[in-house]
Amino acid sequence: MLGYMLTDTEHDGRSTVLLSLLVAALVVVVALVKQRITATRTAGAAKG
């Protein structure tokens, strides 16, 4: 799927780039949320 999207640049390059950016943003958001959850969890454990 991803290889097909990458080879299909001349047909739909703009949406492919947008989709890649969207996926990257989603990955970053998920990583930040996980980090925040673990940070609050460890802080709560240290408090209690």
Image (cartoon, grey):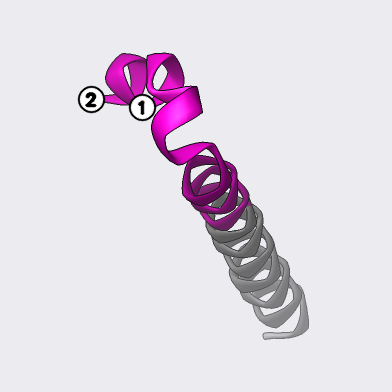
Q: Identify the secondary structure beneath mark 2.
A: loop
Q: Do the residues labelled 2 and 1 touch (CB within 8 Å)?
A: yes
Q: In this view, does 47 lie above or below 25?
A: below
Q: Looking at the rendering, which quadrant does residue 46 occupy?
A: bottom right
Task: Name the image quarter holding the C terminus.
Answer: bottom right
Total tally of numbered discs in the picture: 2
Nearest to viewer (mark 2 / mark 1): 1
Which residue is under mark 1?
5
Residues drawn in magenta:
1-24
Give the Cα distance between marks 2 and 1.
6 Å
**Which residue is located at x 49 percent, y 26 percent?**
10
Q: What residue type is labelled 1?
A: Met
Residue 27 among those drawn in magenta: no
Task: Name the image quarter holding the N terminus.
Answer: top left
Q: Residue 31 carries which label?
A: none
Relative to 8, 29 lies left or right: right
The crowding category of the residue bearing disc 2, from other C-alpha atoms within 10 Å (few below 14, some 14 to 19, many at least 20), is: few
Which residue is under mark 2?
1
Whole-percent x, y for residue 38 in the image = 62, 63
In the foreground, 14 or 32: 14
